[in-house]
Amino acid sequence: MVRYEGLLLAYPQIAQTDIENLEAAINKIIHEKEGSVLSFERWGKYRLAYPVSKNEYGVYFLVRFDIPEKTSALTDLKMLFETKLNTIILRNLFTRLSFDQPLAYQRPKSLEETPARESEGFSREDRRRDRDRGVDRERDFDVEEKDVMPVEEHIVA
Amino acid sequence: MTKKIKLKISSRLVKKKMRRTTNVQKTCRFCTDAEYKQGLDYKNATFLRSFLTERGKILHSRISGNCAKHQRCLAHSIKKARMVALVPFAAQYN
């Protein structure tokens, strides 16, 4: 048996039914070749390091499975992602794992896990992000006329 | 009467010598720290980003202090992470 790990990058607007279909398709191929799926995890939504097919965001999935040696399961999976499921999957990466390697891993926090950004943040990076989103921060700082207290002028003789 | 000659050493040279002597021998953290080594994985993007420059280039081992073996492992995992858009190939021009 050989252990593999696959990281899949999906479109950000992936529907729940698509996720179920994806999992079912992976399970089907691996069970056909008498392998076993260890885990199928959804990481969550992420801001990508660079736009992939004009997508700024993406959803990651991690699959781990054991398959017997000298089977076409891995090539079948790759073919599936690049042809039939290419409306869902943007990128795929398969790596081989050794059996003595621990299955625990660390991953970056997704957008759903990170708390909303504080409005006080005014660093250079924040400003750049705002510009990307088209948010005008200057507008928030404009004081409305009714808020301003009239100042009496004292003329000193 | 003989004239005393005072040897002058330029301040620049002194500074240069100081810099050379204060240079601490760097050791590879992956070799010494087992916990640190566990973080070396292509999925751990936040960790890998600490080995990139602002422009997204891989830091030289001379700067990070990694040994050749672990620098190779690191470069491999960064390149893998780049393929799945976890780590940038280059900084974005805005």
Image: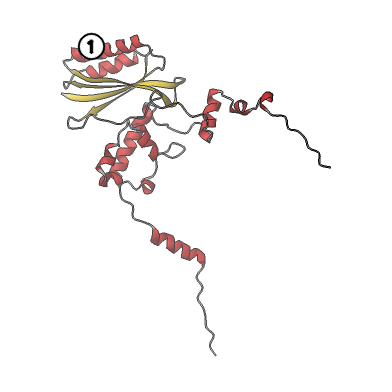
Dot 1: within a 10 Å radius of its alpha carbon, few (fewer than 14), some, or many (20 or more) residues? some
Picture coordinates of residue B22, whole percent (x, y): 39, 60
Can residue B93 be seen?
no
Counting the numbered discs, the total is: 1
Q: Left of A139 or right of it: where is A30?
A: left
Position above or below: B25 against A120: below
In the image, is residue B89 above or below residue A79?
A: below
Foreground pick, A11 / A106: A106
Work out which quarter of the rendered image holds the N terminus of chain A and state it: top left
Residue A139 % position (x, y): 62, 25
At horizontal 43% and vertical 60% (from top left) the residue drawn is B19
Question: Which quadrant holds residue B87?
Answer: top left
Locate the C terminus of chain A by quadrant.
top right
* Residue at 51% over, 66% down: B11
State the SS at label 1: helix
Where residue B92 appears, as percent x and y from the top left, is: 49, 31
**Residue lying at the far bottom of the rendered structure:** B1
A78, B17: nearer the viewer? B17
Quadrant housing residue A22: top left
- Residue depicted at 21% across the width and 15% down the height: A30
Q: Which residue is mark 1?
A: A28
Residue at image coords 65%, 27%: A143
| Closest to the observer, A15 or B5 | A15
The answer to whether residue A130 of the structure is visible from this angle is yes
Q: Determine the chain carrying the residue at label 1.
A: A
Residue A26 to residue B34: above or below: above
The three-letter code of the residue at mark 1 reads Lys
Lateral position of residue A75 relative to residue B56, left or right: left
